[in-house]
Image (cartoon, rainbow, N blue to C red):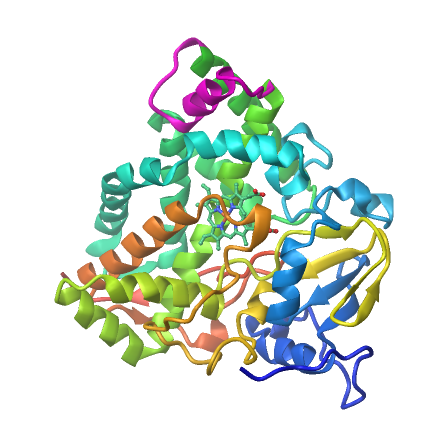
Amino acid sequence: MPHHQNTPEPASEGPAPELFTWEFATDPYPAYAWLREHSPVHRTTLPSGVEAWLVTRYADARQALADQRLSKDPAHHSGSAHAKGRTGIPGERKADLMTHLLNIDPPDHTRLRRLVSKAFTPRTVAEFAPRVQELTDRLIDAFLEKGEADLIHDFAFPLPIYAICDLLGVPREDQDDFRDWAGMMIRHGGGPRGGVARSVKKMRDYLAELIHRKREEPGDDLISGLIRASDHGEHLTENEAAAMAFILLFAGFETTVNLIGNGVYALLRNPEQRERLQRALGEGDTELLATGVEELLRYDGPVELATWRYATEALTLGGRDIGAGDPVLVVLAAADRDPARFDDPDTLDLSRRDNQHLGYGHGIHYCLGAPLARLEGQTAIATLLRRLPDLRLAAEPDDLRWRGGLIMRGLRTLPVQFGAE
Ligand code: HEM
């Protein structure tokens, strides 16, 4: 494995690439390659004006994700008041719903994570497989006859929201409200604009009411499971339960939209890999599907930057001195293309074995929903390839637009065409 020396200061070879432009949103990987090589822990000014560090090498990224001196609590941010609470989740700042797993440190994090892990087990997810398959087929049925679709709007977007609503125990008749609120957040994410704040408030009121109802009449769902788990010993306040439901919805929504969107797009751009997967699936072999979805996460994952961390004390990372209170942003997309860790990192290889990517994070905040994400990603991709075998892109790659924003990476639309079944 090649080894990089730490670079204490940015090297002087050429100017640093411009970050956060339109070109960068379309393809950030060349800029990340430059940063990994010349300024692996890089101080930059974000579009919001906030100063932050970007960590782009795999080894540094993994170390930072596990470093307890990097807090998730925005109260540690030394920056201006307007930056406080920036977690990538739009809506009200410091709203009660924001006191969730991704914004807290141990010991509260440990207690809440233990509680939710009791209710949200790999078994819960496995039992959910037939429902995900049914949802996937229903969404495809709706556009199959048309011969064309926007795979983001018609497929990747509704699938995870209905899946999580079902899992949480939101009744079917209310799920379209959730879809609309979530749509508002994803379209206008990043700022506390009127519509977003209203959607967050509606969601909060609805969840509070739902939790109340589930206390009275528990069911076979995750919210009832959370309430049950908290009744056996450890305590969960009403607000913590609402914040937990919210983060499950939020963390499991746009991520999965992007896993399906970025994943299908990568397959359409790499026809040999796609044919290989289609052949394997046709022969009943699902191993390539499993390694393939992991590779799609590494190659162009949904989460470009991990959620914010703040240094609780002065520390050194990758040879750079980070000040107490500085925001540190771990660039998962850059770490997962690091040639020091992955052979031929810019090549999509669905059968890649040595693939400990950071797409789901690392350490105590490692993605709680990874088993559900894998189930949804594998079901969605396998079913699309099976039912729409000649699926093809109906736009020039240069005409596709990527959603801006710091944390997530995903397409706004993915126009496709296909023949009949
Ligand atoms: C945390 C990625 C789907 C729930 C995370 C983190 C990443 C991630 C990178 C860590 C963030 C950090 O350390 O800053 C993904 C990806 C997904 C996905 C790529 C889809 C492909 C889901 C789903 C759910 C979920 C479906 C649940 C329904 C969570 C929760 C956390 C989390 C609750 C916070 C865990 C903690 O702080 O202890 N996810 N996620 N995720 N994810 Fe996911």
Residue 390 in view, yes or no: no
Q: Is residue 222 magenta?
A: yes
Residue at the farthest top position: 216
Where is residue 148 drawn, in percent x and y? 28, 62
Foreground residue, 106 or 10?
106
Question: Quick check: 105 above or below 31?
Answer: above
Residue at 47% across, 45% down:
253
Q: Quadrant of residue 328?
A: bottom right
Where is residue 252 drawn, in percent x and y? 47, 44
State which region is magenta: 216-237
Where is residue 381 drawn, in percent x and y? 30, 59
Foreground residue, 241 or 133?
241
Residue at 56% across, 67% down:
333
Q: Is 136 displayed left or right of 94 in the figure?
A: left
Where is residue 11 drawn, in percent x and y? 79, 85
Q: Quadrant of residue 16?
A: bottom right
Foreground residue, 327 or 204?
327
Question: Quick check: 329 above or below 106?
Answer: below
Residue 403 in view, yes or no: yes
Quadrant in which the C terminus appears? bottom left
Q: How many marks?
A: 0
Residue at 37% across, 73% down:
352
Q: Is residue 321 magenta?
A: no
